[in-house]
Image: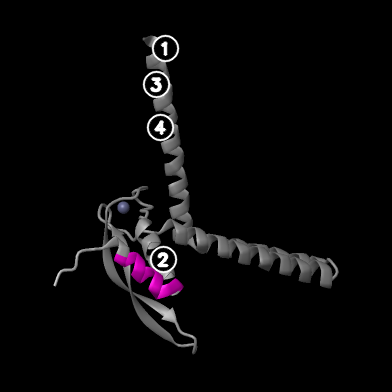
Amino acid sequence: MIVPYCHGLAKFNHLVQGNRMEDEIVDLSEEEKEEPWCSICSGFTDYRRKWTTVPRADLDGGAYSENMEIPHCVTCGSVMQYLKNCKRLVISVRILVILFLLLSALVFLYLYDPSVFSLLCLSVCLVVANVLNRLPRQSRQALLTHKIFMREQELQDAKKILQADKNITDL
Ligand SMILES: [Zn+2]
Protein backbone atom coordinates (compact mmCIF):
# COMPACT_ATOMS: atom_id res chain seq x y z
CA MET A 1 0.00 0.00 0.00
CA ILE A 2 1.36 3.42 -0.92
CA VAL A 3 0.83 6.02 1.79
CA PRO A 4 1.05 9.60 0.55
CA TYR A 5 3.43 11.79 2.54
CA CYS A 6 1.46 13.86 5.00
CA HIS A 7 3.28 16.78 6.55
CA GLY A 8 0.89 17.04 9.53
CA LEU A 9 1.22 13.34 10.28
CA ALA A 10 5.00 13.50 9.95
CA LYS A 11 5.08 16.38 12.39
CA PHE A 12 2.88 14.45 14.81
CA ASN A 13 5.12 11.36 14.59
CA HIS A 14 8.12 13.58 15.03
CA LEU A 15 6.69 15.05 18.24
CA VAL A 16 5.68 11.62 19.57
CA GLN A 17 9.07 10.04 18.96
CA GLY A 18 10.88 12.68 21.00
CA ASN A 19 14.28 14.29 21.03
CA ARG A 20 16.43 11.28 20.18
CA MET A 21 14.70 10.88 16.85
CA GLU A 22 15.01 14.62 16.25
CA ASP A 23 18.78 14.44 16.71
CA GLU A 24 19.02 11.60 14.24
CA ILE A 25 16.98 13.46 11.64
CA VAL A 26 19.14 16.59 12.00
CA ASP A 27 22.34 14.53 11.74
CA LEU A 28 21.19 12.75 8.59
CA SER A 29 20.19 15.93 6.76
CA GLU A 30 23.49 17.61 7.69
CA GLU A 31 25.44 14.66 6.37
CA GLU A 32 23.49 14.72 3.13
CA LYS A 33 24.10 18.42 2.65
CA GLU A 34 27.90 18.31 2.68
CA GLU A 35 29.50 17.57 -0.65
CA PRO A 36 32.87 15.80 -0.73
CA TRP A 37 35.89 17.73 -1.98
CA CYS A 38 38.47 16.43 -4.48
CA SER A 39 41.95 17.77 -3.69
CA ILE A 40 43.36 16.61 -7.03
CA CYS A 41 40.73 18.33 -9.21
CA SER A 42 40.27 21.24 -6.72
CA GLY A 43 36.50 21.11 -6.80
CA PHE A 44 33.23 19.60 -5.58
CA THR A 45 33.29 17.20 -8.52
CA ASP A 46 30.86 14.38 -9.29
CA TYR A 47 31.52 11.34 -7.16
CA ARG A 48 30.74 7.68 -6.82
CA ARG A 49 30.47 5.99 -3.44
CA LYS A 50 32.62 2.89 -3.06
CA TRP A 51 32.56 0.42 -0.18
CA THR A 52 35.98 0.35 1.44
CA THR A 53 37.18 -1.71 4.39
CA VAL A 54 38.77 0.47 7.05
CA PRO A 55 40.76 -1.05 9.96
CA ARG A 56 39.50 0.17 13.34
CA ALA A 57 40.69 -0.41 16.89
CA ASP A 58 38.14 -1.65 19.43
CA LEU A 59 38.03 -0.91 23.17
CA ASP A 60 39.58 -4.30 24.09
CA GLY A 61 42.80 -3.37 22.29
CA GLY A 62 42.01 -5.56 19.28
CA ALA A 63 41.24 -4.54 15.75
CA TYR A 64 38.30 -5.08 13.45
CA SER A 65 37.49 -3.95 9.96
CA GLU A 66 34.57 -1.71 9.19
CA ASN A 67 32.91 -1.25 5.83
CA MET A 68 32.54 2.39 4.94
CA GLU A 69 31.11 4.19 1.96
CA ILE A 70 33.86 6.50 0.77
CA PRO A 71 33.27 8.98 -2.07
CA HIS A 72 35.63 8.66 -5.04
CA CYS A 73 36.01 11.38 -7.67
CA VAL A 74 34.52 10.39 -11.05
CA THR A 75 37.07 12.53 -12.94
CA CYS A 76 40.36 11.40 -11.38
CA GLY A 77 39.30 8.38 -9.30
CA SER A 78 40.95 9.55 -6.08
CA VAL A 79 39.43 9.42 -2.59
CA MET A 80 37.53 12.57 -1.68
CA GLN A 81 37.36 14.35 1.66
CA TYR A 82 34.59 15.96 3.68
CA LEU A 83 35.92 19.41 4.56
CA LYS A 84 34.14 19.52 7.94
CA ASN A 85 35.87 16.30 9.02
CA CYS A 86 39.21 17.61 7.72
CA LYS A 87 38.83 20.82 9.72
CA ARG A 88 37.91 18.88 12.86
CA LEU A 89 40.92 16.55 12.48
CA VAL A 90 43.42 19.32 11.75
CA ILE A 91 42.18 21.43 14.69
CA SER A 92 42.31 18.49 17.15
CA VAL A 93 45.85 17.59 16.02
CA ARG A 94 46.87 21.23 16.40
CA ILE A 95 45.48 21.36 19.96
CA LEU A 96 47.40 18.14 20.80
CA VAL A 97 50.61 19.62 19.35
CA ILE A 98 50.21 22.83 21.39
CA LEU A 99 49.61 20.80 24.58
CA PHE A 100 52.66 18.64 23.79
CA LEU A 101 54.83 21.72 23.24
CA LEU A 102 53.61 23.39 26.45
CA LEU A 103 54.27 20.21 28.41
CA SER A 104 57.78 19.73 26.97
CA ALA A 105 58.64 23.40 27.57
CA LEU A 106 57.41 23.00 31.16
CA VAL A 107 59.51 19.85 31.68
CA PHE A 108 62.74 20.95 29.99
CA LEU A 109 62.80 24.64 30.97
CA TYR A 110 60.99 24.77 34.29
CA LEU A 111 61.57 21.42 36.02
CA TYR A 112 65.17 21.11 34.82
CA ASP A 113 67.48 24.11 34.71
CA PRO A 114 68.08 25.24 31.13
CA SER A 115 71.22 23.49 29.89
CA VAL A 116 72.58 22.24 26.57
CA PHE A 117 70.91 18.87 27.22
CA SER A 118 67.47 20.29 28.06
CA LEU A 119 67.61 22.64 25.05
CA LEU A 120 68.56 19.67 22.86
CA CYS A 121 65.57 17.69 24.21
CA LEU A 122 63.33 20.68 23.61
CA SER A 123 64.49 20.98 19.99
CA VAL A 124 63.80 17.24 19.50
CA CYS A 125 60.29 17.89 20.87
CA LEU A 126 59.89 20.78 18.39
CA VAL A 127 60.78 18.46 15.50
CA VAL A 128 58.35 15.79 16.79
CA ALA A 129 55.61 18.44 17.12
CA ASN A 130 56.25 19.60 13.57
CA VAL A 131 55.98 16.01 12.26
CA LEU A 132 52.79 15.44 14.31
CA ASN A 133 51.27 18.65 12.94
CA ARG A 134 51.86 17.44 9.36
CA LEU A 135 50.43 13.95 9.94
CA PRO A 136 46.85 14.55 8.69
CA ARG A 137 48.35 15.13 5.22
CA GLN A 138 45.24 14.43 3.13
CA SER A 139 43.05 16.65 5.31
CA ARG A 140 45.58 19.48 5.20
CA GLN A 141 45.85 19.18 1.43
CA ALA A 142 42.06 19.22 1.04
CA LEU A 143 41.75 22.35 3.21
CA LEU A 144 44.61 24.09 1.40
CA THR A 145 43.29 23.36 -2.12
CA HIS A 146 39.81 24.46 -1.01
CA LYS A 147 41.23 27.74 0.38
CA ILE A 148 43.03 28.42 -2.92
CA PHE A 149 39.84 27.55 -4.83
CA MET A 150 37.80 30.01 -2.71
CA ARG A 151 40.40 32.77 -3.25
CA GLU A 152 40.27 32.22 -7.02
CA GLN A 153 36.47 32.38 -6.91
CA GLU A 154 36.62 35.67 -4.99
CA LEU A 155 39.12 37.05 -7.50
CA GLN A 156 36.89 36.04 -10.43
CA ASP A 157 33.85 37.62 -8.75
CA ALA A 158 35.82 40.83 -8.18
CA LYS A 159 36.89 40.83 -11.85
CA LYS A 160 33.26 40.36 -12.94
CA ILE A 161 32.16 43.30 -10.76
CA LEU A 162 34.97 45.45 -12.19
CA GLN A 163 33.97 44.46 -15.73
CA ALA A 164 30.32 45.30 -14.99
CA ASP A 165 31.37 48.68 -13.59
CA LYS A 166 33.44 49.35 -16.70
CA ASN A 167 30.51 48.42 -18.95
CA ILE A 168 28.25 50.82 -17.04
CA THR A 169 30.74 53.71 -17.30
CA ASP A 170 31.24 53.00 -21.04
CA LEU A 171 27.52 53.36 -21.66
ZN1 LIG B 1 39.22 14.41 -8.81
Comes first in the chain, label 1 or label 4: 4
Find residue 114 and report its horizontal and vertical position in percent.
83, 66
Q: CA distance from mark 1 to mark 3?
A: 10 Å
**88 or 55: nearer the viewer:** 88
Q: Secondary structure at mark 1?
A: helix
Q: Where is mark 2, residue-wise?
A: 27
Find residue 167 and report its horizontal and vertical position in percent.
37, 16
Q: Amino acid under label 3?
A: Gln
Taking 6 as reference, is 107 left or right? Answer: right
Q: CA distance from mark 1 to mark 4?
A: 20 Å
Mark 3 vs mark 2, foreground winner is 2
Numbered tag placed on residue 156 in the rendering: 4
Q: Amino acid under label 1?
A: Thr
Q: Where is mark 1, residue-wise?
A: 169
**76 or 67: nearer the viewer:** 67
Residue 134, quarter of picture: bottom right
Numbered tag placed on residue 81 in the rendering: none
Mark 1 vs mark 2, foreground winner is 2
The residue segment tinted magenta is: 9-19
Q: CA distance from mark 1 to mark 2?
A: 49 Å
Comes first in the chain, label 3 or label 2: 2
* Residue that protrudes farthest toward the left in the picture: 1
Q: Amino acid under label 4?
A: Gln
Q: Secondary structure at mark 4?
A: helix
Query: Dot 3: few (<14), some (14–19), or many (≥20) neighbours within 10 Å?
Result: few
Main SS of residues in magenta: helix
Q: Where is mark 3, residue-wise?
A: 163
**What residue sits 75% from the left and 66% below the top?**
105
* Residue that protrudes farthest toward the bottom in the picture: 60
Q: Amino acid under label 2?
A: Asp
Q: For residue 167: magenta?
A: no
